[in-house]
């Protein structure tokens, strides 16, 4: 069984027992439970597919926050030809690792 959820402007495919990496979930600490109620689609083991318009009301995804970390460093370089000038910037984006524990279809 798997589901497609919407969270912070992005869509994720989730399965029980798998990890997903989302944008940082502010206000959640490692060990806290997190509930996703914006479920777009669910595919059951028997092959039945439930599709929401836009969301399914009778489906809830429960998970547990594992950790908050920073992703790999991304370097951006702005180079201006014939001006003897360049600018270098670095960025590391925060993300949250979530363990999907249960997909509940009521």
Image (cartoon, grey):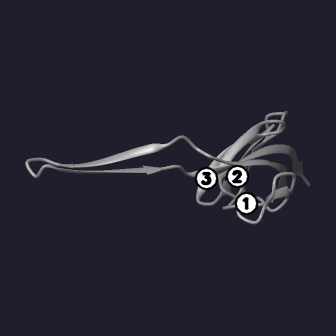
Q: Residue furthest bottom?
A: 27
Q: Residue furthest top?
A: 46
Residue picked out by circle 3: 94
Q: Which mark is residue 90?
A: none
Residue picked out by circle 2: 5
Residue picked out by circle 1: 38
Upstream in the sequence, badge 3 or badge 2?
A: 2
Distance from the alpha carbon under mark 1 to that under mark 3: 22 Å
Residue drawn at 82 percent across, 58 percent down: 35
- Element assignment for label 1: loop
Q: Is residue 84 left or right of residue 24?
A: left
Q: Residues within 10 Å of mark 3 (few under 14, many from 20)?
A: some
Residue drawn at 88 percent across, 51 percent down: 105
**Residue 10 at what x, y percent from top left?**
59, 54
Distance from the alpha carbon under mark 2 to that under mark 1: 6 Å
Distance from the alpha carbon under mark 3 to that under mark 2: 20 Å
Quadrant of the image for the N terminus? top right
Q: Nearer the viewer, mark 1 or mark 3?
A: 3
**Residue 94 at what x, y percent from top left?**
61, 52
In the displayed structure, 9 sits above or below 79; it is: below
Q: Residue furthest right?
A: 106
- Element assignment for label 2: strand
Q: Determine whether label 2 and label 1 are within 8 Å by CB.
A: yes
């Amino acid at each position: 069984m798997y589901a497609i959820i919407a969270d912070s402007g992005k869509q994720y495919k989730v399965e029980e027992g798998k990890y997903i990496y989302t944008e940082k979930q502010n206000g959640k600490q490692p060990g806290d439970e997190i509930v996703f109620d914006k479920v777009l689609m669910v595919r059951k083991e028997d092959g039945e597919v439930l599709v929401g318009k836009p969301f399914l009301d009778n489906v809830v995804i429960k998970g547990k926050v594992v950790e908050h970390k920073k992703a790999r460093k991304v370097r951006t370089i702005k180079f201006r030809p014939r001006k003897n000038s360049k600018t270098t910037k670095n960025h590391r984006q925060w993300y949250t690792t979530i363990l999907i524990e249960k997909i509940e279809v009521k």
